[in-house]
Amino acid sequence: MQSFTYSVDTRSPEFSFMNNLILINDRYSAGAGNLNLKAETNHSINYMLMYKIMLFTLNHEYIHHPLMSYYYSAPENSSVIVGSVQNFDHRQNINAILNFRKSIKRITPSLSFILMKSIFNYPGLNNTILKDSRPVFATSLDVTASLPKDWLLTAKYYHNWGGDLQMIRVGK
C-alpha cells in the first residue's frame, strides 16, 4: 500500500505580536512587537509506502515567510537582549523514516531509522549567516512481548547520532 498527499496551510501571526511596543522584562531582556508580520504558508508533501514488514515515510515541508523568534542586542544598550517575532524568507524540512516490524509468536520487534534535515538560513551576529550543517540521524528499537493473563512487556531503546535541527545542536 502506498499513499501520496499534498497540503497547504496558512498560519497567521498572533495578534499580541503585531504592535509597535517594547516591553521591558528586566534590565537584561525585553520583548518587541512587529507591525509588519505576514501570514506564513506551509506546503507539505508526504509519501508513504507499506510493504510486508516495511514502512517508509518521506515528508518535505516548504514554509514561505515562516514566523520565527529573533533576538538582537538593543541599539542603545548592548547588554539588553530584545526578543521579537519576524518573517524570514523560507524554511524547508525533510523527514524520512524507515521502519521494520514483524510479529513472531508473542514477540513484536520494531526497528526504525529516522533522518531529519532542516534547510534554513538564519541571520547571525556581524552580518553572518547561520545554517544547519548536519542532518539528525536516530535509531529506535522497540520490543513488545505478550505475557500470560494479557500482560504486555515493552523494552525500548533510542539512540540519537547527533546533528542540527532548526539551529539547535542535537545529540553528540
Image: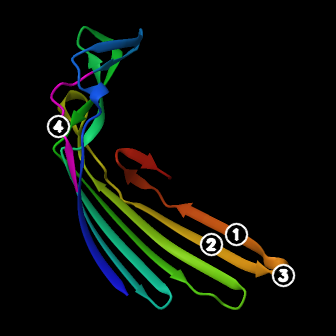
Nearer the camera: disc 1 or disc 4: 4
Q: Residue at x 25, y 34 (%)?
A: 124
- Which SS class for mark 1? strand
Q: Is residue 124 above or below residue 142?
A: above
Q: Residue at the location (70% across, 84% down)?
A: 107
Residue corresponding to mark 2: 142
Residue 45 is inside the magenta segment: no
Where does residue 30 sit, x and y in percent of width and height?
35, 16
Mark 4 lies on a secondary structure that is: loop
Q: CA distance from mark 2 to mark 3?
A: 20 Å
Query: Which residue is under mark 4?
Result: 38
Q: Earlier in the sequence, mark 1 or mark 4?
A: 4
How many C-alpha atoms fall within 10 Å of the one at disc 3: few (<14), some, or many (≥20)?
A: few
Q: Which residues are magenta?
A: 33-42
In the displayed orientation, state which residue is furthest to the right.
Answer: 149
* Residue 84 can be seen, yes or no: no
Task: Tell me the distance, in whole angstroms, between the alpha carbons under discs 3 and 4.
Answer: 58 Å
Q: Which residue is mark 1?
A: 155
Q: Where in the figure is residue 44, as x and y percent of width and height?
A: 25, 62
Label pair 1/3, CB-CB below 8 angstroms: no
Amino acid on which disc 2 is placed: Asp
Q: Are marks 2 and 1 in contact (CB under 8 Å)?
A: yes
The mark found on residue 148 in the picture is 3
